[in-house]
Structure formats: structure tokens, C-alpha cells
Amino acid sequence: MATEIALNIRKTFVGCTTIAVQLRLPLDPPSVTILFGPSGSGKTTILRCLAGLEQPEEGTISCNSQIWFDAATHVHVPPQARGLGYMAQDYALFPNHTVEGNIAYGLSGISVQEKKVRVSEVLSLLQIKELAQQKPTQLSGGQQQRVALARAIARRPQLLLLDEPLSALDAPTRIKLCEDLRMLLTRLAIPSVVVTHDWTEALALGDQMAVIDNGRVLQTGKPQEVFSQPINADVARVVGIETVIQGRVREIRDELATVQVGPVPVIAVASPGLESDVFVCIRAEDVTLELAGSSETSARNHLRGTVQTVTSLGALVRVTIDCGFLLTALVTRSAHSELRLAIGSDVRAAFKAGSVHLIPRR
Amino acid sequence: MNWMAIGVTCKLATLTSLTLLIIGLPIAYWLTYSKWRWKFLIESIVALPLVLPPTVLGFYILIAIGPHSPIGRFYTDLVGHPLPFSFQGLLLASILYSLPFAVQPFAAAFEQVDRKLIEASWTLGLSKLKTFFKLILPLSTAGLITGVVLSFAHTLGEFGVVLMVGGNIEGVTRTVSIEIYDDVQALNYIGAAKTSALLLVVSYAVLLLVYAMNRRVWSVWPQK
């Protein structure tokens, strides 16, 4: 029997996008699925349908052999009976309960003693023991996020649904908590679905991902594959990052990291607490192409390579270069003709250390 | 001052506001969360006592519970005496008359509870009923107190409905407002002044309580 969530739904909002989605989310082994897309793409609605908070007009949703929703037979398992942990974008903590009260809120059918044990377990798992007696209004955004996560996992759900878990936070907190969330999800081993519009989160958290735009699934696959090999221009536009390759940090000096990517070293700005296994991400518009042998520039990375493909995108041309790994560059049509770029021609690709994003690998 | 009338009035106002607390909650809950397209029909009925002259409301209640109506006959058969001109009849009329004063603040308070909190409660496994008692009610206490206090104060001062349905029976249905009317009719201005002052002070105190708690004027219907 398939241990998966199968979803095949259709939902129309008057004057808005129609969502028509078919998805299969494997549950065993527990993995993290990313629903990735721009705002308004329908990814949150899909998550809400999974949670039972929203009902599609047509289609079915099943989890293992249990049918959660079937429009034809009017089956709708309410959210209470789906065994979920659901975290809304703004965390929705209960203002009339303490942190402890929030976490214990959904724990029923167990003894008071066991309840206490459970609450203290998740408090220490999320390192928020000292917040137990505080009210949600007294907490910072990052603390609220931890409490909301603690509350969602306290019931030991069979499926964890996180709606933009990090987007309500400021940038430094987000980077720190993204890392924490990644470790937590690995440790919990609960199948999870995470909605995000941030590609760094998708790469850091996801085992597989679905790119959603205009209410449709455009591509599914491993995040790295989807980012580096978008199947069409729509996906490329939505994901917005073209080069994603695995690398190993070799050394960090003066806050610059040297990352070994295949046979070539790439210089990147090192973020604190960098691990050795990373994804090296470079946006195509950050890559400049120059003829081999031209003068020095401020860019730290100059890689020699040969042109593999040239695709015209109107005013711009997308060029992929094999420089030890496949690098995508976006140049104007005039640059393309000036440099006389053709398949097989030698070229030098340059990009700044600051345009290289390093994302810890799961 | 006629302490008997004050006693009847207090008993009537207390029972009315407590009954409205019990029956007003489900009505307000339904009005807040129902997605029925004809909901406004019920909303308007609940709000009717706000605009209807009390004599009109009293007249219809009198007809509805009188000996010629099935309800009136059923009640007389059951209890042994007719509803009109009894304390029970007066209580029923008061409840209907003060219904919007309880239901509207309740509904306004429920409306204020963030939908996302309610959904969070559902996903944490709590049924709609449990969510109501564990989340919605505790977050609506100000509205609950407003509703109870307003319906209490409103019942204290009612006149038209009392006169139509309760009559003017000493110790049973004679309330302070009728007492004042009788005193004036009998040219007992001193008595009327005393009772009026009492009613004024109590009503003002009650409203002070409500306004201080909410810091805003209560609206006719909750703002969507």
C-alpha cells in the first residue's frame, strides 16, 4: 500500500486564479516537501486544503488509504480528525494562554502528568523552557515561531504543515531559524509540507519540491534539480535562480570561503556558522561574460569555459557555459553578438564573491 | 419609595439578563459564523425590538400568549393560570424586548476573535464546541459583560411592554417605571422624583461600567 498523500483538486476563487493541482507527497521515509511559488500562486490554498480548512470544489485528497476529501461522495474529514500539525504564517498563538498553555492546548486524552512531560519535552526540544510562563504578546517574532512550532508538534502529528514558517521574521533571525528548522525537521522525522516563496529556504529545507504558479504545478523534483534544470521558461522565471551546484567548503579566510565545485574553486562571502557541505547558488544575471584574456576586474571569480547552449529570451540571451560545472549567464543581445558567442566558443565567466549564495545542504 | 416595585424590577432584570446570557450565546454564535445567505432575515428579527415601539411589541406578545392563541392555551393547560399579567409572562416579554441588547454585543465580540486562532484550535484537534468554550468565550468576556449589563439596564427602564403584558399588579408585575407613572398620575411628585433619581443613578452607573470597559460606543451591529 502506498504511504503517500495523493491530492487531485480543483478550486476556483471568483475573480482569481483557478487552482487545479495533482500532487503526490511520499510519507515514507519521512521527507520534507516544499510548495514553492510566488505570492498568489495558490500554494497556501493547497496547504489549507490539506489541512481541511478549505474545501475544493472538485477532486480527492487521500492520506495512505484514508480518504480525507472526496467531492463526488461528499466526504470531508474535518481538520480535527486529520492528525495534523499546522502552523499559520503569523503563528496564531492564543493570546489568552501562556506559552505552556498554548502548547498544552491540543493535548487531550492523556493524564495531567503525561501532559506536563510532553510540554516540557517540546519546550526543551525548541530551547524555549525559560519562556514557559510568558504570554505570546511578550515574545519576539523568533520566539513566537518556536512556540507555534512547539504547539504544532506537541500532539505528535502524522503530518506537519508549515505555511511560510520564516517569512514573518527579520532577515538575521530568519537565517538562524532556517538552520534550526532544518535540524528540527530532520530530528523529528515527521513528513512535512512547507510553503515558501524563498528559494534559499526551499533549498535548505526541502527533500523534494513542487513549483506552483497560477494555481498549477509546473515542476516537481529535488530542489537542486528544479532550480538548476527548470523544465521551461515559466519555471525558470518562478524559481529565479539558475545555477545550483553542490560544493564543499575548503577554507574560510577573511570572511571569504573557498568552495570546491567539481574541479574548480569558487570564492564566496562566508556566512557565520557555515558547514562544509553546501549548495552554491548563482543567479544568471550576476554572471558577466568576457573574452578570454581580458583585463582584471573586481570580481573574485573568473572561470574559463566553453559555451554549451545559447537560448534567446527576447532582449536577453541565456548562455550556459561548461567551466568545470554548468554555469548559466544572462546577457543582452548586443553583448551576445559583440562577444560572438556560439556553441563551443571559449569564454570567461566572471561573478563577484558577493553574488554567490551558500546554502547548507540537508 | 415602593420597595416591592424595586424588588420586582431587580428580580425581572436579573432573570432577564441571565436568561439572555444563556439563549443569546447560541444565537450570537450562529449569527456570527453561519454562512447561510438569508441570515440577514434573522438578524433583522433580532434587531426589531430596537426600533419597534414597545407598545407594538407588547401588543403582539399579548396576542401570542393570550387565551386565544395555541401557545397561551397550552401554557394555561400546563401551569393552570394564563401567561399575560403574570410575572412569567412579563419575563418572556422582557427577554424578547432586550434580545438585541444581549445578542449584538455578544456577536460583536465573537466577530473580533481572529479566524486564524479558531482554525489553529481546530487543527489542534478541538471540536467546534470545545473551541467555543476554550477560545472564543474567554476572548469575548468584555462583550459578554456588556451584553449582560446592557440587557439588565434596559429591562430596569422598560415601560411600554410591561404595561401591555404585565399590567400593573402590586408585588407581581408593577415595576419602578410604572410606579413612577402612577405616582405622577396621583400627583405624588416627591415619590416620583425619588424613584426617578434611583433609576437614573443605577442606569448611569451601569453604563459607566460598560463604557469604561469598552472605551467605545457600542454599535448597532458589529462592523464587518
Image: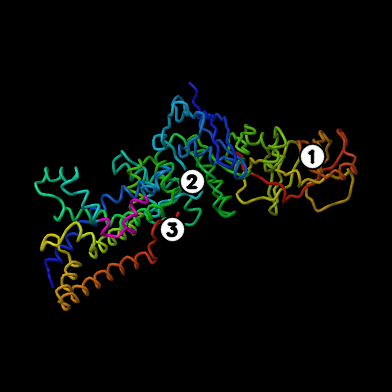
Tell me where residue A342 sits by quadrant.
Answer: top right
Q: Which secondary structure lies at badge 1? A: strand
Q: Evaluate whether label 2 is on the same chain as label 3.
A: yes
Query: Circle 2 marks a residue in which chain?
Result: A
Is A191 situated left or right of B73 in this image?
right
Residue B66, magenta (yes or no): no
For residue A256, above or below residue A312: below
Q: Position of residue A24 (x, y in %)?
A: 55, 29
Image quadrant assignment for residue A77: top left
Which residue is the extreme one toward the top?
A1
Residue at the spot of label 1: A313
Please state if A221 lies on the left or on the right of A155 as rendered.
right
The residue tagged 3 is A137
N-term mark: 1 or 3: 3
- Residue B48 in magenta? yes
Question: Can see residue A303?
Answer: yes
Q: Chain of mark 3?
A: A
Determine whether label 2 and label 3 are within 8 Å by CB: no
Closer to the N terminus: mark 1 or mark 2? 2
- What amino acid type is highlighted by mark number 2? Ala
Is disc 1 in the same subunit as disc 3? yes
The answer to whether marks 1 and 3 mark residues whose Cβ atoms lie closer than 8 Å is no
Which secondary structure is most common in the magenta stretch? helix
Report, in whole angstroms, how far the alpha carbon at label 2 lies from the one at label 3: 17 Å
